[in-house]
Amino acid sequence: MENEFLLNAGVSHTQVMTSPSSSSAILNWVSTETQQVDPRLSPNLSRDCIFWEKSMELSIFNSALSSLVSSQSPSNSSFSGGGGDNFVIRELIGKLGNIGEIYGILANNQNVSGSCYVTPMRSPSQIRMSVTSTTTPSLEFSGDPGFAEIAAMFSRFGSRSFNGRTNSPFEINNGPVAETVGANEKLPRVSNTPAFGALASQVPAGEFSGKRKAKSKENSLSTASQSPNLSNEGEEKEDSDSKRSKQSVDPYKDFIHVRARRGQATDSHSLAERVRREKISERMKMLQDLVPGCNKVSGKALMLDEIINYVQSLQRQVEFLSMKLSSVNTRLDFNMGALVSKNILPSSNNLMGHQQVLQLESSSEILLGDHHNKTLQLNPNITSNIVVDPLETSEARSFISQLPTRTHFTDSISQYSTFSEDDLHSIIHSGFAQNQTYESNPLI
Amino acid sequence: MVDSLFPSIENTGDDDASPESSRKKRRISETSKEAETEARRTNEESLKRWRTNRVQQIYSCKLVEALRRVRQRSNDAGKVSGAAREIRETADRVLAASARGTTRWSRAIIATRVRARLKKHRKAKSTGNIKSRKATTETKRIKLPAVERKLKILGRLVPGCRKVSVPNLLDEATDYIAALEMQVRAMEALAEILATAAPRTTLTGP
C-alpha cells in the first residue's frame, strides 16, 4: 500500500500545480500519463480520503520539489523533454526518502482530513522556485486545459520570484491564503499577482520616499531616480536589464544627481557611499596640496598623520613666535608702528607702497598719536634708534628681500622646527640678544 | 571683493544672522547643479586668499595694533609674565577676525574669548564646581579604527571642530592650515623687523 501511494505520489508530482478541487483534471491526467499504475490508481481515487491524501501528497511533494529544484538545476533540463516524465518520476521517487517518513506519519493519523488542512499551510511556503521552474517545463506535457491555465499562472508567479527579497515575504503570506481557500484557489492566485505587482512597485518606492525625507538635501542621491526605475520593474519581469542600464536624470531638483557608471552597483546605498567617498577624497587631495611632504605618502591614515603633524608644528611655531614677539615687545615702545608699516611693503611696487605706508602709519599710530619723527626727538636716551634709523632704509630693502615668501616657507619648514629651538635657546641663555637671533635668521 | 569668494564655503551649524542663511540657500541651489566642480573651485579660491600679500599686510597691521594695546594694558597692570600666551591669543584672534567669520574655527576662536570673559565674571561671583569633567573619563574605551582616531585628533586640533562631520572637518582643516601659514609668515616678518629695529642692548650674559 505504501508503494502504491509512493507511486501515486510519483505520478502525481505534476499535480502539485493543480488545485485539489479539479479532481477530474487529476483523474484525466493520471489516465493519460501512466498506464501501469492506472488499475491501481482508479480504485484509490474513488475514495475520498485518498483524494485528500493526494492533496496532502501534493503538498508534501511541493516541499520535495522545492528541495529537488533548488538543489539541482540540471533537473530542469530533464523536465523539458517530452518523454521526460518517467525520469521526473524516478527522480522524485529517489528524493522521497524523507517524504516517505512524513507520509508514514500522516497515514497513521486517524483524522486525516483534519490534518491535511494543516499541511498545505506549511508547505506552500516552500513552493517558491520549485513551482516556478517546474511549471514552465510542465507546460509541455500537460494536455489538460485547466492544468495549462494553472501552469501559466505559475509561470507568471515564477518570473516574479526572481526579483529577490521583496518576493519571498510576500509569497509566504500569499501561499497559505491561497491554499486554504480550496476551491477558489485559482482566483486568489490570479488576483494576487497583479496586486503583488503593484505592491512590489510600491514597497521600494515607499522605502525610498521615506529615505528621501530622512536624508538631508545635499547628501541624498538620486534615490528619486531609483523609484521610477523600480516601478517599471514591477510591471516588467526581469530586473537584470535595469541593473545594467544607466539611470536617467531625475526631474526632482533637490538632490545631487549621480549617474551610475558602467559596471558599478546602482544600489542607492552604494551610490551614496560612493558620493561620500568622493567628497572626502577630493578634500584630502586639497589638503595634500597644502601640506608639504604629503605627496609621498598614500593612504588616508598616513596622510592624516602628516596633516596632524603639520598643524601641530604650525601651532608650535605660532607659540614660539609669540614668545619672541613678547620679548621684543617689552623693550620696543615707540617705533613699532612706523617701522612695521614701512617694512611690510610688497616688494613689487614701491610707489604704491609709499602711499600705503602713509595710510598704514596713520592707521597704526592712532592710539599713540605720534609720528616716527617725534620719537626720535623724544627719546634721546635710546641712541640706538638714531643709529638704526638711517640704516632703516637700507635694512628695509634687505628685509623685504628676506621676507619669507611662501616657497621659502614651505621649503624650510622642515628645518624650521630645529631652527626655532636654537633660536629659543639663544634667547633664553643670552637674554635679549638681538644680535644672535639676527645672525641665525639668514636660514630663512 | 573678498566676500564674493565666500558664498559656497560649507558651514554646518550656523547660528549667525541672515547673510549666512541666504548664503546657505544659494549654496543648496548651486549644489544641485554641479556640486563637485563648483565646490572645489570656490574652495581653492578661498584658500588663495590666505596667500595674497594684501591679506598679510592687513593681518600684520591689525596685529601690531593689537600688540600695542596688549602692551599698554600689561604696562598698566604691571605684569610681564604670561605675555607669550597673551600674544598668541591675540594673534589668533586677529587671525580669526581677518577670516571674517566665514569659517567655523574662526568663529570658535572668537567665541572662546567671549566665553572666557563671561566665565571670569561668573567666577568672581560664585564658585563653580567642576564635576562634569570626571564623568566623561569613566566611559568605556573602545578602540576606533585608525583613520577615525586620527580624524578625532584633527578635530581637537582645529578649534571648534570636535563634533563636525568628516568632509566639513577636512574643509575647516584646509582653511585653518592656510590661515596658520599666513599667520606664521606675518609673525615671522614682524618679529624680524622688530628684532632688528630694536635697540641693541649690550649683553650682560653669563
Image (spheres, helix red, strand yellow):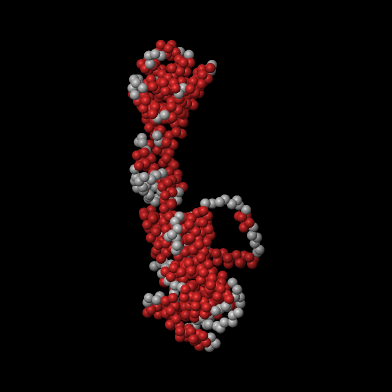
> Where residue A46 sits: x, y (%)?
43, 12
Asked whether residue B149 appears in the rendered view, the answer is: yes
Q: Nearer the viewer, residue A83 or A173?
A: A83
In the depicted structure, whether residue A334 falls above or below residue A187: below
Could you tell me which residue is drawn at 38 percent across and 58 percent down?
B38
> Where residue B30 sits: x, y (%)?
38, 56
Q: Nearer the viewer, residue B145 or B180?
A: B145
Q: Count all numbered tags in the image, as a single digit.
A: 0
> Where residue A96 sits: x, y (%)?
46, 22
Could you tell me which residue is drawn at 47 percent across and 80 percent down?
A339
In the depicted structure, whether residue B110 falls above or below residue A247: below
In the depicted structure, whether residue A56 falls above or below residue B146: above
Left or right: A329, with A69 as reference point: right
Could you tell me which residue is drawn at 48 percent across and 61 percent down?
A307
> Where residue B102 sits: x, y (%)?
46, 63
Q: Nearer the viewer, residue B111 or A265?
A: A265
Could you tell me which residue is drawn at 46 percent across and 69 percent down?
A412
Left or right: A267, with A308 as reference point: left
Asked whether residue B98 appears in the rendered view, the answer is: no
